[in-house]
Image (cartoon, rainbow, N blue to C red):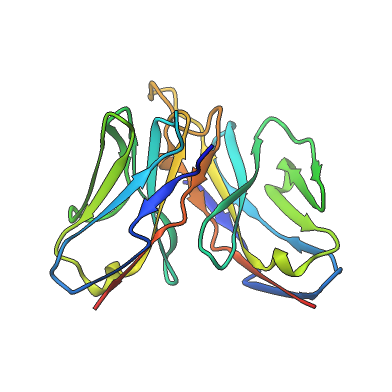
Amino acid sequence: KAGVTQTPRYLIKTRGQQVTLSCSPISGHRSVSWYQQTPGQGLQFLFEYFSETQRNKGNFPGRFSGRQFSNSRSEMNVSTLELGDSALYLCASSLVAGPGTYEQYFGPGTRLTVT
Amino acid sequence: AQKVTQAQTEISVVEKEDVTLDCVYETRDTTYYLFWYKQPPSGELVFLIRRNSFDEQNEISGRYSWNFQKSTSSFNFTITASQVVDSAVYFCALSEAASLMETTDSWGKFQFGAGTQVVVTP
């Protein structure tokens, strides 16, 4: 079974631009979560989608948004990029929402560099 | 509020030595879940183990073993006879269960520790 895939793997953008990252979950998984990883803040939860609905959002500004499609694929968008948005963005998929009965599996991440 | 503390920033060992990674957690919930993930230089987080709060049975999987003790709020991880391929950052994570007010569960409470860098040299 194919794992979680994320595209692109690397991205360089300029301050003020916007960016869209894509995540394809493991086949059959309906929950997709996004995380931001930086050296200073570590791994932080961004948001979670389940059956095309955002179920939870972390403490991030409104410039960070996302969506999930009917095939469970998810995208996240960051508008008006700032230097501090440079990070590894990780996507994780799970069979169901929440850890009650199942674990989540992570993709390889998208390394975003903002200059 | 929940919190995960991995006090060890980096551990360096020589191949074949054992290494134990500490994880201490805080939560007010009686039902919660604990996890360990490995992040090699490639960046992908690899799931290692999951534990429910009501299951304190320790586990061994090959060279990996986990010691869960609710009395000390710890969920420590040991690599026996370390190998160079074990070099990675290891994360402990905690997620509280859905509250009575929530109709369904969510990964929104999933919280990682700061991670411990393990360096295994030949």
- Left or right: residue A82 compared with residue B93: left
Picture quadrant of residue A63: bottom left
> B105 or A91, which is in the foreground?
A91
Q: Where is residue B4 shown, x and y percent of the image?
A: 56, 54
Between residue A103 and residue B4, name the one nearer to us: A103
Residue B60, horizontal then vertical, whole percent:
81, 44
Which of the 4 image quarters holds residue A38? Answer: bottom left
Q: Position of residue A54 (x, y in %)?
A: 28, 35
Q: Quadrant of residue A60?
A: bottom left
Horizontal relation, residue B75 to residue B37: left or right: right
The mark total stands at 0
Residue at 30% x, 52% y: name it: A59
Q: Quadrant of the image for the N terminus of chain A?
A: top right
Between B76 and A108, the one nearer to me in the picture: A108
Above or below residue B101? Residue B14 is below
What residue do we see at 55% from left, 31% from top?
A: A102
Q: Quadrant of the C terminus of chain A?
A: bottom left
Give coordinates of residue A77: x percent, y percent: 22, 53
Q: Is residue A60 above or below residue B49?
A: below
**Residue in the picture at 18% in, 74% down:** A14
The reply, left or right, for residue A101 in relation to residue A4 is right
Query: What residue is shown at x 78% (from left), y 56% (from top)?
Result: B78
Residue closer to the observer: B118 or B5? B118
